[in-house]
Image: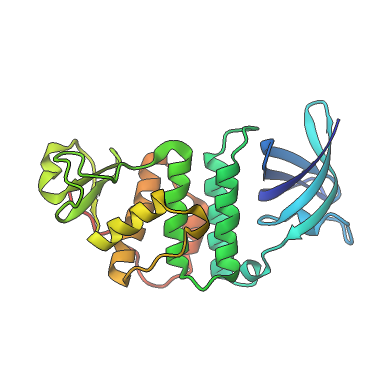
Amino acid sequence: MYLTTTALVLREVEYKDSDKLLTVLTPEQGKLTLSARGVRKKKDATAAACQVLTWAEFTLSQRQGRWQVKEAVTQRAFRGVREDLDKLALGSYFAQVTETLCEGEQPEPELLALTLNALHALDEMSVSLTQVKTAFEWKAMALAGYEPMVGECGVCGCETPEAPCLHLREGVLHCKGCREKLGEGVSMPLTGAALAALRYIMWGNPKRLFSFTLDKPSLRKLADASEAYLMTQLERGFHTLDFYKSLHTETMTYDRTT
């Protein structure tokens, strides 16, 4: 059986002397594991396409239930990401989150589009890395079924909560004064502007996901909340995120309410 498909390489693992195992996300077949034999040899024709964060066209063959790379041609290498360590580290984090959220061999076209758009933003758009990361985290969680309820306070129903906060475990927006009526766990404060940006990320045009303006204090609160929400809901960390954060000298702490 042969298959020709485009795919984004999410992960690569070296094995044997010259081979790789690739985890890729395709538009129609979803997440696949590919065997790329001999790809680490000098002058191998498929080497460039078989790198993490590469969008490529693959010709595959299936033997005994396993997909093998026969041909691979790079469609987009995101060179602006590869040539900047911060961007490369952040793009690798996006890939690891996407791999975690995808079910095996289930089409995830919206999540694939989001990841490609985030890489494009890193590659070519004049948007801060914090803004790209924040929007990606919120939208990825929403697409995977973890969308927080941000339309109104989950306790009193107010659409414009006074001192808005987000309960990380419950995924519920609430007024600061309504906090005691929710269960145990951590709530993180937002600003009115941060809440408006969050609603834009959740409900706005996905093609303009990163095109919002937010003052730095509000962006910081929204960014802190997005990362903490993702970690809380998925109950895990990401080594790629740890590396990205290690590149920055400043101490990153969360502002939170109890």
- In the displayed structure, does residue 50 sit left or right of residue 250? right
**Which residue is at the front of the view, 180 or 218?**
218
Residue 180 vs residue 41, the one in the foreground: 180
The quadrant in which residue 148 appears is: top left
Question: In the figure, is residue 157 to the left or right of 214?
Answer: left
Residue most extreme to the front: 205
State the count of labels: 0
- Look at 40% across and 49% down and name the residue there: 203
Q: Evaluate whether residue 118 shows in this view.
A: yes
In percent of width and height, residue 243 lies at 50, 60
Examine the image and state in which quarter residue 184 appears. Answer: top left
> Which x, y percent locates residue 28?
68, 37
Position of the N terminus, as image quadrant, is top right
Q: Where is residue 133 drawn, in percent x and y?
A: 46, 59
In this rendering, would 254 be left or right of 38? Answer: left
The residue sitting at 68% across, 50% down in the picture is 9
**Looking at the image, which residue is at 20% across and 44% down?**
153
> Can residue 13 be seen at all in this image of the molecule?
no
